[in-house]
Amino acid sequence: MEVALSRGADLGLTEEQQDFARAVRDFCARECGPGRLAELTAGFDDLHNSGIARRMAELGWYGVAVDEAYGGSGGGLLEACIFLEETARGEAPIGAYAVTLIVAGALARFGTEDQKQRLLGHVAAGGALAIAMSEPEAGSDVAALKTRAERSDGEWVLDGSKMWCSYAHKAMEILIVCRTGRGESKHEGLSMIFVPREAEGLTVTPIETLGGKETNELHLEGCRVGADALLGEEGHGWTQLMAGLNYERVILAASALGLAQRAFDEALAYAGERRQFGRAIGSFQATQHKFADLATELVQARLLVRAVASMTDAEPERMLPQEASMAKLACTELAKRCALEGMQIMGGYGYATEYPMERYLRAAVVTTIFGGTSEIQKNIIAKTLGL
Ligand SMILES: Cc1cc2nc3c(=O)[nH]c(=O)nc-3n(C[C@H](O)[C@H](O)[C@H](O)COP(=O)(O)OP(=O)(O)OC[C@H]3O[C@@H](n4cnc5c(N)ncnc54)[C@H](O)[C@@H]3O)c2cc1C
């Protein structure tokens, strides 16, 4: 069955963008197909393979959305979304990429020339970066974070605990959001400071999750870094975080969209092959309607992601809280629905670890939690409606 619309390459993209999507898709099919994926991910436990990341960087793909002056290959958030969607759909084991791109965005906006040369160059070469905002007692209420950085002998000294720092174990440096001053509100006195993963006083401890080795707890104890590790302005951490929200939400949305499409593709292929009562299960109207609904939602979600990415590329300074939250909410909830429906469509085989659907479901359930839960996205959307 031809799935041209749900493949999405032709939804408002230029010829060049479609060629890019096709090239990424072909690479994933060739290099990361079912036969190779288990080997590339140590049995699906380590979802970031540095070798694959480096090879994609050699093709210029890691440099998408990175300025050419820093080793990037140009392009904007829309091109990054195409890459994120296709790599998620193609199961490329580059789990650290999305969070790396979020940090690269902050660097591009607020980094010094020296920070950009060093760290954006690292990204364009296939390297990873991480960001630590969340803490044991600061999740959705992230501004309640307590990790502190004090000035001492021209350096910053950091103390505190961070939770859920994704791919810190792969990152060269971690952007720590911390408190450097006291303000009247919890949003004041926050700053962003880069800490090398190997810095003395920083401990990175993996957290066991449904998704394997992806996220970590960090402990900072008297961790010293140079004064030049500060990103942007001291005390402006909250405004700097807010400035990156369009970017962050669209990045997470595009990855979830790729995952949603992957689960859909898998279920569709299965429904064409599996026969019961003498006919393919895809010939039952009950199954067809599930696919029709999901295919429609996939196209809607893709158009939304691309619209918000294009608006952000056109006006990088413009805050789009409603649209960006809608994109994150729509794509992540859709990823969950596609994987759940996919499992139902595949029956017992969807539940078996021999088939990939249970893995897609495990990957999908966390997307509505990280980067701001669905409830928080709905709060933001409701606020933009004046409620
Ligand atoms: C795998 C994974 C990777 C992550 N990666 C990173 C990372 O790289 N860097 C980073 O800084 N953080 C990261 N996070 C943290 C993530 O952003 C938080 O988990 C998320 O913001 C929710 O915080 P919490 O888990 O503390 O849940 P809580 O904030 O305790 O929320 C629990 C429940 O209460 C609901 N709730 C809370 N407040 C409200 C409200 N005002 N209205 C309605 N409902 C509400 C939530 O929606 C949720 O259902 C990651 C998390 C996970 C699980």
Image: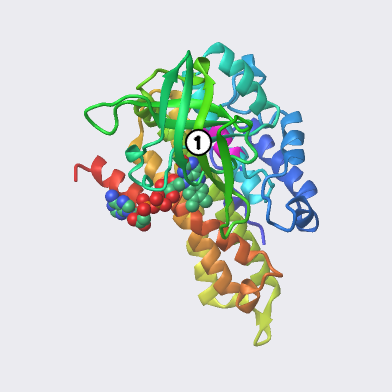
Q: Relative to 114, does residue 342 appear above or below in the rendering?
A: below
The secondary element bearing badge 1 is classed as strand
Disc 1: which residue: 220
The image quadrant that residue 200 belongs to is top right
Residue 338 % position (x, y)? 53, 62
At horizontal 65% and vertical 63% (from top left) the residue drawn is 266
The image quadrant that residue 17 belongs to is top right
At horizontal 57% and vertical 17% (from top left) the residue drawn is 115
The image quadrant that residue 168 belongs to is top right
- The residue range painted magenta reads 97-102
**Amino acid residing under circle 1:** Leu
Q: Relative to 265, does residue 177 appear above or below in the rendering?
A: above
Residue 359 shown left or right of residue 238 in the figure: right
Locate the N terminus and report the quarter of the image it occupies.
bottom right
- Residue closest to the eye, 252 or 13: 252
The chief SS type of the magenta part is helix
Does any portion of residue 307 appear in the rendered image? no
Does any portion of residue 200 appear in the rendered image? yes
Q: Residue furthest left?
A: 387
Residue 386 shown left or right of residue 90 in the figure: left
Residue 162 % position (x, y)? 47, 42
